[in-house]
Image (cartoon, rainbow, N blue to C red):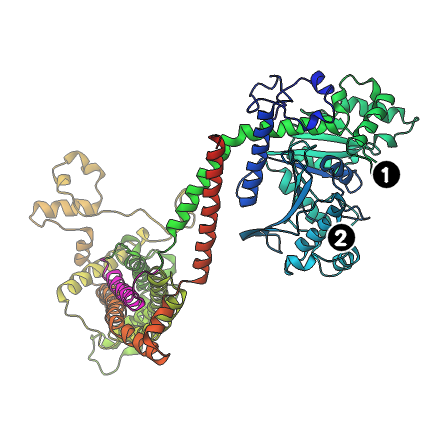
Amino acid sequence: MNFSFPGKNRDARQSTTTSATSSATETSSPPDDPWEPLDLSSSEYARRRREMMQLINDLRSLGQTLMDLPSIVVIGGQSAGKSSLVEAVSGVNVPRDSGTCTRCPMECTMSSSATTWSCRIKLRFDYDSSGHSSQQQKEISFGPTITDKNEVDIWLRRAQAAILNPNDPPESFHRKSIQELRNLTATNSLKFSRNVVSIFIEDPSATDLSFVDLPGLIQNEDEEVVELVRQLTEGYISRQNTIILTTIPMSDDMQNQLSVKMAKLADPEGERTIGILTKPDTLGDGAVNSKQLWLDVIEGRQHTLKHGYYCVRLPDDAQRAQHLSRAALPRIAADWFDATPPWSGVADRGRFGIPAFVTDISVLLVHHINRLIPQLKQDVERLLDSCLEEIGALPSPVEVDPQIEVLRRVNAFCYAFKDVVSGANSDKSLAQRNRALYTIFAREIGGTSPDFRPFENPKQYMSIDELDSEEHTEVRNDKVQIMGVYEVRKTIAESIAWELPGNIPYEAKTRLINQFTDLWFAPAEKCVASINDVLDDVIRQLTKTHFGQFRVLQNTISDLIRPDIEEYKSKVPLIVKETLNLELVPIYSQNVKDFQDLREKWLNKYRRARKNPGDYRIPESPPEGASKGSRPKKNLKLDHSCVSMGASEAYETPEIQALRYLAQAGYKDLTVEDLARLYPRDQFEDELVVMADVRAYFTIAYKRIIDHVPLKIHQSLHLALAVKLSVSLLQRLIVDSTSTGNFADRMKELVSEDPAIGAKRVQLETKRTRLQEMRRKLVNFAAGV
C-alpha cells in the first residue's frame, strides 16, 4: 500500500505553530498530487476532514471485523514512552501504573468541531471472552459525558475493567475506586482482551485525528500473556490499510526493539510505518556515538522508512505535576530541541515535536481515507452480495400451517425414496453404488471357480483358466484347492459305494461342487453388509434433505423409520442364505444345452492339455517383460482364409494343417479342442469327465447366483421398505404426536427452526443491516450529503 504525504512541503510545515495545527489544512479534499500546497486555514478542508474521520468511526462502530478500514495504530514496548506519547497527542491523562497498564486496544478520536472540551467513552465488543470473533457486535456508551480532563483517567480504568470482565454488567463498574479496580484486576479479570475502549474527545484546540493505542509489548510475563499481546499487535498491523506508528526509545538500541521487528515483518518495505523516537533527553553529553546514530536515522541515512521518523520530547513526571497548559508543553520541547545539539543543527525542523508530528499524520490519514473510499465502497458491495447469497442459501421459514408442512415433507420423503429405489430420481446413487457392489460380488463368486489342472503334478502347470476368463477368475479365492488328476481320482475313490464297475459316483461330483458353493456365503454376507451401509447413507441424506431445516423433525423421522429399516435389513441375510442354500441340494439345472456345450468345451480343453502339457508348464525363468505363470492367449480356431493361402502352409502347425484338411473335406468351423475327440482314451479319462462336469456346472450356477442374489436383495429390502415406509411412517407419526399431547402443538414443535439455523439467520440479517448502513454512509459521503 503506497502512502504519501499530500499538501505543504516540509519548509512550510516548519513554520506551523501549535494553534495552526488545529486549523484546517486544505481545500475540499486532499489532492492526488502529494506536492500540491495545503491551505492550513481552509475551513472547507477542516470540515471535510472531520467528516472523513466521522465516516471511518461510524464504519468502525458498525463492524471493525467486517472490513480492513484505514486507521493509525500505535505500538511499542512497555517502557518506550507510548503512554506519554498518547497523552501528548490526545491531551488527556491515561492510566500510568507500574507494570502493564493498557490491557485492551483504545481507540482515540479527536475532533475540533466543538467550542468546549468534552469526552465520551464507549465499549465495543467485537470478540467473545475466548478471543473469537463474536456473532453479534455490541457497542454501548460507558458513563456520562466527561467535561473535566482530570476525570478521564479513572473512567478509562473503569472502562478497561468492564472490557476485561465481560460477564459483569458494565454499569457495575461506574462507581468503583482505583483500589477496587486494582483488586479486581488481580483476581478474576482477563489478562488482555481484543475488545475496544473507544474515547471521543471534542477539543477546539485539537487536530482532527483518530488512532488506536495497543497494549505495550511485554517480555517479562507468562509466555501465554506475552504471546497474546504479540498476536493482538500482529492482528492490527498486518492489515494493509493500517498506518503503523512504532515508538522507539532513544535510550536503547533500535535493534533491541520488538516493535521495530514486528513492524518490519508486517511492512517489509517500510511504506506504511512511521518511527516515533522518544526520550532524546536521556542521551547524555558523552553519548556522542549514540546521538550520531539517531541523527542518521532522523535524516534518513539509516533504517530508512518512506515517511521517516519524528523525534519528540515528552513531559517528565515533574512537568506533568505542574499541570502546564497544552500549548506550553510543545513550546518547552521546541526550545529544548532548538538549543540542544545535534538536534538543533537538523535542517528539517518539522521532524521534531508533537505539533509537526500530529499535523503530518492527520494529513496522511485524511489523504489515505479519501483515496480508499472507492475501494471501501467496492468492499461493502462485495460483502453485501456474499451476505445476501448466504441468506438466500438458508432454508425458508415455515409460512404455512405446521400440520400441512409436516405432512407435505413426509409425503415428499416417501415418494423420493421410492424414486431413488427405482432409479427414477435424479439421484442415482443407490442404484449406482449397489451395482458397483454387485460387480464386486460377481467377481468374488467367479474367484471360487474350481482350479482343475489335468496333470499328475498340477502345481507345475498353469491354470487352464489362463485361456478362459469368463467367470472373472483374475483373482481366485485363496481357499480354492489346486487339483490334478490324482486329487480327483482320490475324490472318486472316496465316493464309491455300490456303483456298478465303470460308473463314476455322483457323490464325487457333488463333493467337488460343494467345495466352491460353500465359499459363496462369505462374499454374499460381505455384499449384504455393504448394501445395508449404502441404504443407511441414502436414508440419512434423504432425511437431511427433506427435514434438515428442522432438527427436531429430522431426529423424530429418523427414530420413527429406524425400526422398519432394521427389520428389513435383518431379513436380508436370511433371504440371501436361503437363496444360496438352493445351490446345495439338489445339484440341478434345466439349462441342458448350455451345460452340455460347456461340458464338451472343458472336456476337450482338459484332453488337449493332457496331450500338450508343454503349453501349460510354468517356465522356471519367465521371459523378460512377462509375468510368471502367464502366457499369451491363442486363437486356435481355423480361419477359412487360411485354407486358400498356400503361401502360409510352411508356417502351419500340425493341428492347423489337420483343421485345414478337415475344412476341405466339409468339416468346417472346427477348433483344435475338437481334435481332442480323436485322441485315444486317456488313462485319466474318468477324472477328466468329472473335471468337465464340475467346471461346466460351476459356470451354470455362477451365472444364476450372481443375478439371483442382487434381485433378492433389491426385492426383499429396497422395494419392500419403500412400500412399508409410506404407510408405517404416517401411522407412527400420528401415534407419536398424539401420545405426547396436543397434535397441533406437536406439529408446531416438529417444524420449529433449528436453533443453529435461526442463530445463523439472525447473524446474517444483522450483518446485512450493518453493511447496508455502511453502504448508505459511503454513498452519502461521496455525494457530499
Kind of residue at disc 2: Asp
x, y percent for residue 141: 61, 50
From the image, state whether disc 2 or disc 1 is nearer to you. Answer: 1
The residue carrying pointer 1 sits among few (fewer than 14), some (14 to 19) or many (20 or more) residues within 10 Å by Cα, namely: few
User: Could you tell me which secondary element the residue under label 2 belongs to?
Assistant: loop
x, y percent for residue 469: 28, 55
x, y percent for residue 700: 21, 65
x, y percent for residue 765: 44, 51
Residue on which the image places disc 2: 222
- At 53% from the left edge and 30% from the top edge, which residue is drawn? 372
Instruction: Find the distance from the CA under tag 2 to the CA under tag 1.
Output: 37 Å
Magenta stretch, residue numbers: 398-424
Residue 180 numbered tag: none
- As drawn, 554 above or below 136: below
Q: Which of the two residues, 115 or 255, is positioned nearer the viewer here? A: 115
The residue carrying pointer 2 sits among few (fewer than 14), some (14 to 19) or many (20 or more) residues within 10 Å by Cα, namely: few
Residue 322 numbered tag: 1
Q: Which of the two residues, 436 or 114, is positioned nearer the viewer here? A: 114
- At 31% from the left edge and 53% from the top edge, which residue is drawn? 466
Q: Which of the two residues, 586 or 229, is positioned nearer the viewer here? A: 229
Q: Is residue 305 left or right of residue 127?
A: right
Q: Which of the two residues, 551 or 591, is positioned nearer the viewer here? A: 551
Question: Is 213 covered by the magenta stretch?
Answer: no
Q: Classify residue 264 by image quadrant.
A: top right
- Whichever of callouts 2 and 1 sits on the residue coming sooner in the sequence is 2
In this figure, what is the number of numbered marks? 2
Kind of residue at disc 1: Gln
Is the magenta region chiefly helix, strand or loop? helix
Q: Is residue 695 among what the camera can see?
A: no
